[in-house]
Amino acid sequence: MEACDLSVSPKTKSQALLPRLLRGRLALGVGLFLLAFGSGLLYGASAADKDVRTIAQRAFGPDLTEGLGRAVASLPSSAIAPIVFNTLSDAELDIGGDFIDFVDTPEPEAVSAGDYYCLPALPNSDNNLGKTLSSWGTQVNQGSQSQASQWMAHISAQLESARWPKIHERAQLARVPVVMYHDVLEEKEVFFDITPTRLNDDFRALQAQNLTPISLDQLVNHLRTGVPIPDKPVVLTFDDGYVGHYDYVYQLAKYYNYPVAFSIFTDKVDGNIVGRSTVDWEQVQEMAQDPLVTIVSHSVTHPRDLRELSDEDLRYELEAAKARLEKKLDIPIHYFTYPEGNHDERVVEATEAAGYKAGLIMRNDSGKFAGESEDLLTIERFGESRFYEVIESAWGGPPLQGAQPALNFEAPVQRLEVEIDDIPMTFISGGQPQTIHADSRYPLTEIVAQSNAVAAVDGTFFSLEFLDSNTMIGPVMSRNTGKFIPGGRGDIYKLRDRPLVLMSPDEVKFLSFDPKLHNSLEGIQQEMPDVTDAFVGAGWLVREQEPQTARTFKNLFAYEEHRFRAFWGINMEGQPVVGATHAQIDSVGLGELLRQAGFYNAVMLDSGASTSLVYQGESLIGFESRTVPHAVALVPQGDDSCGINATNPN
């Protein structure tokens, strides 16, 4: 379940036009149009379009029609309107008269913004609707990017950089994909071309999956210093200076507010080399003045293999290209893209000698994340054909250690696949943490299906005496039941000093369990008056940024054995995180990995055969887990556990 449902209301679906369905290309309605400008971006990946493109476009009131016209006019280029709004032709954006009038149907009930989920009711007096919504989106995006840039610059100044051109050890833990594109044109001519529609789909997918495009400057700064970057970063690069880079890429980048990098080889722009198409100097100069754009040197003549050149010719390709770009654009050129990725030690040394700070390579048969690069002068990239594969694994790496983070229950719920020291793990962060105590034992997928949770991990220890038992080891309280159940006298003293987890709508606490104080509702209310959830975890993994040693696990059964492990905690961003390992590991080793991954507190849950992790209704564990009665769940902010059912899911 997403925090914001992009499907249309039943009322609007009933007004969908069958002829559009038959024609196979469906136009987006005003609901999604307004949603796009309300956020500054179009929501939803291309995969969602099948469910979204059935919205009828008709019977607009004067305010919506005028607002729509102003919003279309506010696009960076009218040429991208059919791409962004998925219309059949430019004629469909004729705002002057009837917006769509192509089929004889009964007059429908008017469509309003209130017919679409996730949209606020818009005042009828707002006759500047498109401009207002576009302005909101621009302010939101520019504001967040500005804050991030200032924050990163502040931290970067305090960090000890790796010795250039080495990559900082913190950056080596991150998984930042640098994606390489070439030409963008209406009809593909070679396999690595893409269409403007495909590019728009890629850009929308980034937003839908909560990725943040970053600039080359941000990437290089991160690789040198280990400075934090957004949770799910990506770098977008475009090689060879095709005219589609100006006509489509640059216009869409401005529309989505995405940083992009263009690699230019100068003889092509000068007209000395005839290619399929080329940008001209006026266009390159315009793009170079935009803060969203980084211009990268790509040599003078684009020789297929720099390794085959003489020393003199190699210096010419590197130095003359840099000098020409700097003279024409009046900006410093810091980065170089190796034509066809070909390089060796001599070529890299010449690149350094020419004054470049970083270089981009490519591989035809593989690709690596930026942190896996050999050094800054050979930053790895992925071809665009692997776009949807690599963005699934994007991760900005662990945040810096510091003071206790402020809790953040408003971040979107998102999934990250991470591998540290050869141990693959899934982290799911964001939303509000809650627990679910079912009336019996069920597969975790069935428990989650009866709730509004986006994700959940199996909870703490429970009695195995009966197959249908929901008796927990230690005290338990869950928001779905509203009941506090004390732990059995025979168990609670064995749990002394294990992590007691307390939750309320606004707070989470991790305390050492005291059986004399914490086995009653009154006792835990002294620690947290508005407590709604409580349980005792299996053991501490990370406590206030410190990984725990073997002695802290005391009498915990099999803590030293290598098993699949489940866990939950709070990261250094203040976000709740649930997760599991996909390889077997001991408890102490897991604590060290979670510290590296940026956990402030982390608690181990029931593991081994019980290890379960669910995201958007699907199990992420590669084996059939034991049925469980308890779960730690992540619910989008505002849902307040609505819909959680403690009774039989079946």
Image (cartoon, rainbow, N blue to C red):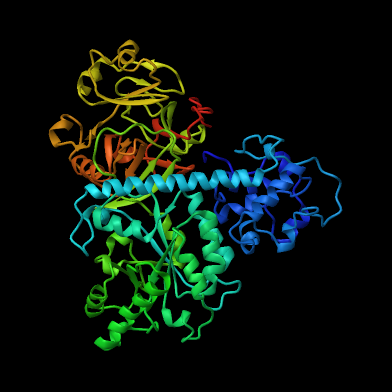
Q: Position of residue 286 (x, y in %)?
A: 50, 66
Front-lying residue, 630 or 442: 630
Give 240 or 510, whichever is nearer the viewer: 240
Residue 376 lies, in percent from the top left, at 27, 65
In this picture, residue 244 sits left or right of residue 73: left
Residue 583 shows in the view: yes
Q: Nearer the viewer, residue 125 or 205?
A: 125
Q: Which residue is found at the position 24% from the left and 20% from the top? A: 491
Q: Residue furthest left?
A: 551
Q: Is residue 525 above or below residue 358?
A: above
Q: Position of residue 145 (x, y in %)?
A: 42, 48
Q: Is residue 442 above or below residue 646?
A: below
Expressed as whole percent of the image width and height from the top left, the position of residue 488 reads: 29, 16
Residue at x 78%, y 41% (from the top left corner): 110
Residue 563 occupies which quadrant of the picture?
Answer: top left
Tally of numbered tags = 0
Q: Is residue 194 left or right of residue 605?
A: right
Taking the image as shown, residue 465 lies to the left or right of residue 113, namely: left
The residue lying at 71 percent from left, 35 percent from top is: 125
Q: Is residue 502 above or below residue 304?
A: above
Query: In front: 215, or 437?
Result: 215
Q: Is residue 251 above or below residue 566?
A: below
Decide if residue 422 is in sight here: no
At 30% from the left and 34% from the top, the residue drawn is 405
